[in-house]
């Protein structure tokens, strides 16, 4: 995903934009595989003039470290 401005998508829209995340939602049962995940899932896009990479995914998992590391 790229564009001419910063964009933020959240929840279900994020999952639709990233094909590898579609496994997080069961369409038949209409439920999340990990309850609460979609409400905390978001995407932020940023324009790039270099265009050296078509899509880069960074995953941030806040709360896994207590800050003392």
Image (cartoon, rainbow, N blue to C red):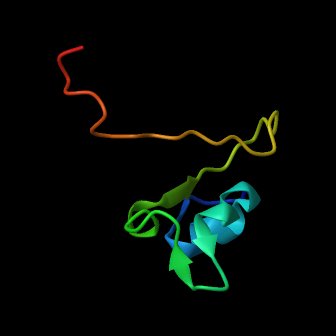
Residue 45 position, x and y percent, is: 60, 54
From the viewer's perspective, is 67 left or right of 7? left
From the viewer's perspective, is 40 left or right of 16? left
Q: Residue furthest top?
A: 69
- Please say if 7 is above or below 63: below
Taking depth in this image into account, of 63 and 17 the one nearest to the observer is 63
Q: Residue at x 46, y 63 (%)?
A: 34
Taking depth in this image into account, of 68 and 27 the one nearest to the observer is 27
**Which image quarter is the C terminus in?**
top left
Taking depth in this image into account, of 7 and 16 the one nearest to the observer is 16
Residue 28 position, x and y percent, is: 67, 85
Residue 7 position, x and y percent, is: 56, 63
Q: Residue at x 75, y 41 (%)?
A: 49
Q: Residue at x 43, y 62 (%)?
A: 37
**Which image quarter is the N terminus in?**
bottom right
Q: Residue at x 60, y 71 (%)?
A: 25
């Amino acid at each position: 995903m790229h564009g001419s401005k910063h964009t933020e998508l959240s929840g279900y829209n994020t999952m639709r934009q990233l094909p590898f995340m579609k496994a997080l939602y069961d369409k038949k049962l209409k439920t999340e595989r990990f309850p609460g995940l979609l409400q905390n899932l978001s995407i932020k896009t940023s324009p790039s003039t270099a265009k050296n990479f078509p899509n880069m995914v960074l995953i941030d998992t806040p709360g896994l470290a207590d800050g003392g590391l």
